[in-house]
Image (cartoon, rainbow, N blue to C red):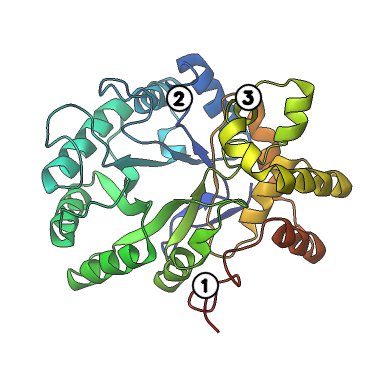
Amino acid sequence: MHRTHLGRTGLTVSRLCVGTMNFGWQIGEEESHAVLDRAVELGLDFVDTANMYGSETGDGLSERFLGSWFDKSGRRDDIVLATKVYAPMSDRPNDRGLSARNIIASCEASLRRLRTDWIDLFQLHHVDRRTGWDEIWQAMETLTHQGKIRYAGSSNFAGWHLVRAQEAADRRHFLGIVSEQCRYNLLQRHVELEVLPAAAELGVGILPYSPLHFGALSGALRKQREGIAGRAVLHAPDRVEPHRSAIERYEQLCARIGLDPVTVAIAWLLARPEVTAPIIGPRAAAQLDLPVAAVSTVLDADTMAALDEIFPPVGNGGPGPEAWAW
């Protein structure tokens, strides 16, 4: 398994990150453990979760499943563990957002569910326009000094949010944000305008989620024809139909070059210089094989150009303002 540094840090991670959003919501504890066992066999050591994943009433099943796997496998030291804070975890008004109170309380609750003493990457799951950065960084500094977290990351931030966050961290002589988790795939390329350029300038590693656009880029049309159940069928009306023509051309291109659509979509992301590790969300251990194949797949210039033609970038392509200005 190829490895890289997480943003500007000295921490190394596998080029794929195992996302656990399906744990608790789509699959049970035993199936979740099987996914993690297979991931480790394949050399994947980067695992992402969130306090809200698998949660119905604040129970955080995804984190609990990871915690029970750590106890059973003894693999905690082998894993770079990421989780998140922001989403409501109860009806109480202070059990949400990025107040210092909630950041610290959520971290401690996640540690209990995960059955670990530390979180490697503690991510701000969304922007909180009501809370100032000095308050946010004060809480993150406290957790860092206590040894409960190692690094801070963000998710769903705009480019200017990254800049403001880092400016405030620099004033406090704090490391700041080292990674940004954003929705990024062949069908959704808007982050290329400002998020990716800002991240590159600041040394922030990009962790794309939904790399297959909810299954639309996984060979969805073929699966529909063959009656294969899965997300490609479940999300067909919303995720596939609006892009049917492009997806048809995409699947034809993949067939011509002899690669599975899953592998191509993830290999395309891995070729982007700003990307640290795409986040994959398997519901079964076997679903790890095609993404792992992408790590050693190099798409040639003709294929990259064909993908740009099928899935055009926003505007003129590349970062703003050139993407929309002369």
Which numbered disc, 1 or 3, marks the residue that appears first in the sequence? 3
Q: Give me the residue at 36% from left, 28% from top.
A: 63
Q: In this view of the protein, can residue 183 be seen by the observer?
A: yes
Asked if disc 2 and disc 1 are in contact, CB closer than 8 Å, the reply is: no
Q: Give me the residue at 35% from left, 53% from top.
A: 154
Q: CA distance from mark 1 to mark 3?
A: 35 Å
The percent position of residue 71, horizontal first and vertical second, equals 38, 22
Q: Is residue 226 above or below residue 77?
A: above
Q: Give me the residue at 19% from left, 27% from top.
A: 90
Which numbered disc, 2 or 1, marks the residue that appears first in the sequence? 2
Q: In this view of the protein, can residue 293 be seen by the observer?
A: no
Residue type at the position of mark 1: Pro
Q: Dot 3 lies on which element?
A: loop
Q: Nearer the viewer, residue 296 or 93?
A: 93
Q: Which residue is mark 2?
A: 23
Residue type at the position of mark 3: Gly
Which numbered disc, 2 or 3, marks the residue that appears first in the sequence? 2
Q: Which residue is mark 1?
A: 319
Q: Specify the quadrant of the image occupied by residue 211.
A: top right
Asked if disc 2 and disc 3 are in contact, CB closer than 8 Å, the reply is: no
The percent position of residue 46, horizontal first and vertical second, equals 49, 43
Q: CA distance from mark 2 to mark 1?
A: 35 Å
Q: Is residue 286 left or right of residue 194?
A: right
Query: Which numbered disc, 2 or 3, marks the residue closer to the eye?
Result: 3
Q: Please identify the quadrant where the C terminus is shown.
A: bottom right
Q: CA distance from mark 2 to mark 3?
A: 16 Å
The percent position of residue 45, horizontal first and vertical second, equals 51, 41
| Marker disc for residue 230 | 3
Q: Is residue 73 above or below residue 167?
A: above
